[in-house]
Amino acid sequence: MSAINRRRTYPVNVGGVTIGGNADVVIQSMTNTKTANISSTIDQIKLLHDAGCELVRLAVPDQNAAHALKSITKKSPLPIIADIHFDAKLAHLAIENGAAKIRINPGNIGGPDALITLAGKAKKHKVPIRIGVNAGSLERNIVKKYSGVTSEALAESAFRYYELLEKAGYTETVVSLKASDVYTTICANRLFAEKTDAPIHLGVTEAGPPGVGIIKGAIGIGTLLAEGIGDTIRVSLTASPDEEIKVARRILQALGIRVFGPELISCPTCGRCETDLVLLAEKVEMLLKNISIPIKVAVMGCAVNGPGEAREADIGISAGKKQGIVFREGKVVKTVDQDLLLAALKDELGALIKERSECGS
């Protein structure tokens, strides 16, 4: 597991899922259906749940959406977070209709008085609030103070509202500081993390389609997680929401923070490669798709990148021109014809899984 020393934060309970404290980093996403369309929203929540999502946020732009939460929360396999902009009254309605958490943007919610009133309602119903500070909607006076949208401006806005709730006696606050600029996001979160022990929700907003969004999310979220900052994450992508879950899991597993199943490692190929390693790696990836045991599997393209460089793998294969090898923990266990290599890996993988299962039983 990871040797990362995570920042100490207080725990917040969101419908039975804990953010902060000693809990795992929680994965969340957001539906892109019309919330008032109850059936399509529930279908997408179930899709996210099956993909591994642990908290789901729904847009609540009007009263129809707020009232729809009553039915949705009863059928949802995940705790529901209501996303509110511009109208604090919708946040009150969302709480009344079963939302497990409220996300507000302090730059457009109606000022300090509206937030304190909402906190009173949330405290009564034991509903946490996320102060979601976004670069695109910072308060004008803060933007003017810093001559633009900077990491310092984001951090000041977040801390201002966090402190406001703290002084009002509200202690179930989660905070996020997001910009579409990765470095601004990183620096803003660092600044805020130094000042409080509040749980932090990480993300890079408006990151874009998968091609660029995955890179921006992995750098922004991954950098902060590696520094011990972050208690829940959302990878924002212009794509089907379940794609966000896959990327979030990969970020957490790459850092050793959480393990969700096998890890596939493979060499990048070069002129020594004597087989279609890209195709072989894809076939192995499909082979591992339904395996939940956390093992490391290597797919290598030649003797140079065989058992030696993949010694840390639990099991792996190295392809040659006519023959290939299967190895476990750096030691060759089988040599087979090239066209039998995948089948040999499958057999050896089955034996390894059986051993691990028996050891765990």
Image: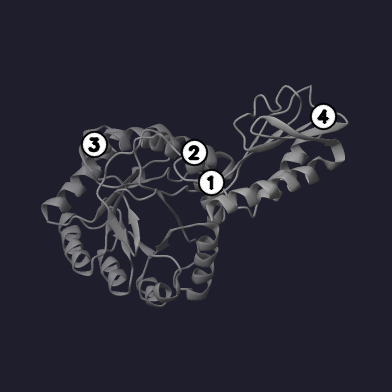
- Disc 4 marks which residue? 320
Closer-to-camera residue (283/147):
283
At label 3, counting other C-alpha atoms closer than 10 Å, the crowd grade (few under 14, some 14-19, many 20 or more) is few
Estimate the spatial distance between the alpha carbons at disc 3 and disc 4, rounded to whole Å. Answer: 63 Å
Residue labelled with disc 1? 247
137 lies above or below 113: above
Q: Nearer the viewer, mark 3 or mark 4?
A: 4
Residue at the image position 66 percent from the left and 38 percent from the top: 315
Q: Is residue 215 left or right of residue 10?
A: right
Q: Which mark is residue 130?
A: none
Question: Which residue is at a point 49% across and 71% down the rendered structure image?
Answer: 42
Q: Are marks 1 and 2 in contact (CB under 8 Å)?
A: yes
> Is disc 4 placed on a helix, strand or loop?
loop
* In-front residue for pair 342/148: 342
* First in sequence: mark 2 vs mark 4: 2
Q: Position of residue 172 (x, y in %)?
A: 23, 56
Q: Are marks 1 and 3 in contact (CB under 8 Å)?
A: no
* 356 lies left or right of 104: right
User: Would residue 238 be visible to someone looking at this image?
Assistant: no
Mark 1 element type: helix
User: Which quarter of the image is occupied by the C terminus?
Assistant: bottom right
Amino acid type at image mark 4 = Gly
| Residue type at numbered disc 1 | Val
Residue under numbered circle 2:
218
Q: State which mark lies toward you, 1 or 3.
A: 1
Q: Nearer the viewer, mark 1 or mark 4?
A: 4
Residue 281 % position (x, y): 72, 40
